[in-house]
Image: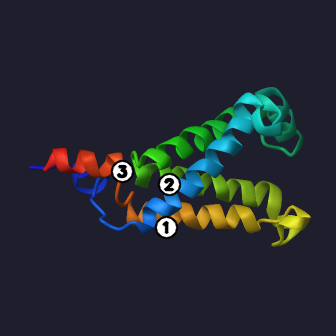
């Protein structure tokens, strides 16, 4: 008899649509996480990001930078692999809600004004993959086949 996790976490989805979303979002999330964690791609690393987060009221700043950076970097990696996709996508959607509410919402919709347009798109992708699962070519589907 399957456990609750086996029944729901790795439910197979034979569509290619989630794969396309996973690849794009995974790359984007990993890059943003790498900016926060490692200072790559023009980012400020944990110290700089932590100071900025503290300055906008997200305290303790270093810890918040570590949490956001880790969610984005490792969440993006898990999306690329299709590993624990539903749980990962839920964490990433929540991360985007916080980013939108804490940073972008007062600036309106458009990215040109530092608005929430991009965060909203990433949040919706995350919600979509949380609902659909990983799709084809994923570790989740390999694990699902083993649990049968």
SS at circle 1: helix
- The figure's colour scheme reads rainbow
Residue 137 in picture, x, y percent from top left: 35, 53
Q: Quadrant of residue 16?
A: bottom left
- Which residue of the protein is positioned furthest toward the left in this rendering? 1
Structural crowding at the residue carrying mark 1, measured as other residues with C-alpha within 10 Å and reported as few (<14), some (14–19) or many (≥20): some
Query: Element at badge 2?
Result: helix
Quarter-wise, where is residue 130 in the image?
bottom left
Contact, mark 3 vs mark 1 (Cβ under 8 Å):
no
Q: For this view, does 8 lie left or right of residue 135?
A: left
- Residue 119 spot, x, y in % from top left: 70, 61
Above or below residue 75? Residue 113 is below
Q: Which residue in the protein does label 3 denote?
A: 138
The answer to whether the residue labelled 1 contacts the one labelled 2, judged by CB atoms less than 8 Å apart, is: yes
Which residue is rendered at x = 54% and y = 44% of the image? 75
Position of residue 143 in the picture relative to residue 81 (left or right): left
Residue that carries the numbered disc 2 in the rendered image: 89
Question: Between marks 3 and 1, how big is the CA–CA gap?
Answer: 16 Å
The foreground one among 35 and 63 is 35
Residue at left offset 25%, top offset 45%: 143
- Comes first in the chain, label 1 or label 2: 2
Image location (x, y in percent) of residue 118:
73, 63
Q: Position of residue 23 (x, y in %)?
A: 52, 54
Q: How many marks?
A: 3
């Amino acid at each position: 008899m399957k456990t609750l996790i086996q029944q729901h976490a790795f439910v197979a989805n034979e569509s290619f649509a989630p794969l396309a979303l996973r690849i794009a979002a995974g790359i984007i999330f990993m890059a943003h996480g790498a900016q926060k964690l490692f200072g790559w791609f023009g980012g400020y690393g944990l110290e700089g990001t932590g100071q900025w987060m503290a300055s906008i009221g997200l305290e303790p700043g270093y810890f918040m930078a570590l949490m956001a950076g880790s969610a984005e970097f490792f969440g993006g990696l898990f999306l690329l692999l299709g590993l624990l996709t539903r749980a990962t996508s839920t964490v990433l959607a929540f991360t985007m809600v916080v980013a939108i509410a804490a940073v972008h919402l007062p600036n309106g919709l458009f990215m040109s004004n530092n608005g929430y347009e991009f965060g909203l798109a990433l949040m919706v992708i995350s919600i979509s993959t949380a609902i659909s699962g990983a799709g084809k070519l994923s570790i989740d589907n390999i694990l699902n086949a083993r649990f049968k």
